[in-house]
Image: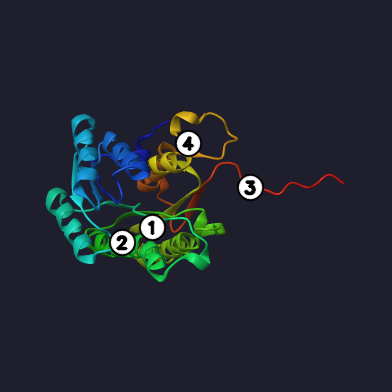
Amino acid sequence: MTTGQFSVADRTALITGASSGIGKVIAGRFADDGANVVICSRELDNVQPVADEINEGGDGTALAVECDVTDRDAVDALIEATVEEFDGVDVLVNNAGASFMAGFADISENGWKTIVDINLHGTYHCSQAAGEVMRENGGGVIVNVASVAGQMGAPYMSHYGAAKAAVVNLTSTLAYEWADDDVRVNCIAPGFVATPGVASQMGVTGEDIDRTAVKRRIGLSEEIADIAQFLASPASSYIVGETITAQGVPNIMETPDV
């Protein structure tokens, strides 16, 4: 049996929102496999240490770029820097996102627009800009990161859930439109994942989780990175326009005792 079909070696991957959490782990995973990675965050000081760590120990090369994905000029500059450094873009992982908890009636117009702008418009900007390069250069792969909140709804996160639902829909639509250009578009919808944000807000860390236990309600960034690498690799060549849900045990209503 061979495993080379799961490799992303020698590819150029752009991962947004890579200063911590899922994005950081995906970038490290790709680089360890021999990919060149471009990682971005709104502040260079937050993402440069990630690139330095990768360059010290990874097989691939990392380039850190400051970029606000809601700013089209900044996104265009990000793509230009990627092409200048690595001659193209083979993989885009739209991971940048943000949220806060509030009841729908309490969300201000500015708050709503901010969350939609980061999660949805950021995906639009990066996909359109990177996709242009991919389509001109013979194809590529786009992996969007949505959320189970966008599939089932989420109390006190209506703005986030609505934006992520749009990302799921955009995934299937864009996959259809760009298939003729050999650009594959898929999506990951994570459930509860132990990230630094979750650790600070809820006190749950990756060290608290038994990854070998099937029945658990929280996953690790490494497990989402596994899916991202699969979707970015040739192993998933017949998967197009799909959203892979990673939420652990399904929430199923059991039949009550009579």
Residue 73 in the figure: left or right of residue 143: left
Q: In the rendering, which numbered label is found on residue 204?
A: 4
Disc 2: which residue: 127
The reply to whether callout 4 and callout 2 are in contact (CB within 8 Å) is no
- SS type, badge 3: loop
- SS type, badge 2: helix
Q: Amino acid at mark 1?
A: Val
Question: Is the N terminus in the top left, top right, bottom left or bottom right quadrant?
Answer: top left
The tally of labels here is: 4
Disc 3: which residue: 251
Q: Position of residue 180 (x, y in %)?
A: 34, 65
Disc 1: which residue: 185
The reply to whether callout 4 and callout 3 are in contact (CB within 8 Å) is no
Q: Position of residue 204 (x, y in %)?
A: 47, 36
Q: CA distance from mark 4 to mark 1?
A: 32 Å
Q: Residue at x 27, y 39 (%)?
A: 9
Q: Residue furthest bottom?
A: 109
Q: Earlier in the sequence, mark 4 or mark 3?
A: 4
Q: CA distance from mark 1 to mark 3?
A: 27 Å
The reply to whether callout 1 and callout 2 are in contact (CB within 8 Å) is yes
Q: Earlier in the sequence, mark 4 or mark 1?
A: 1
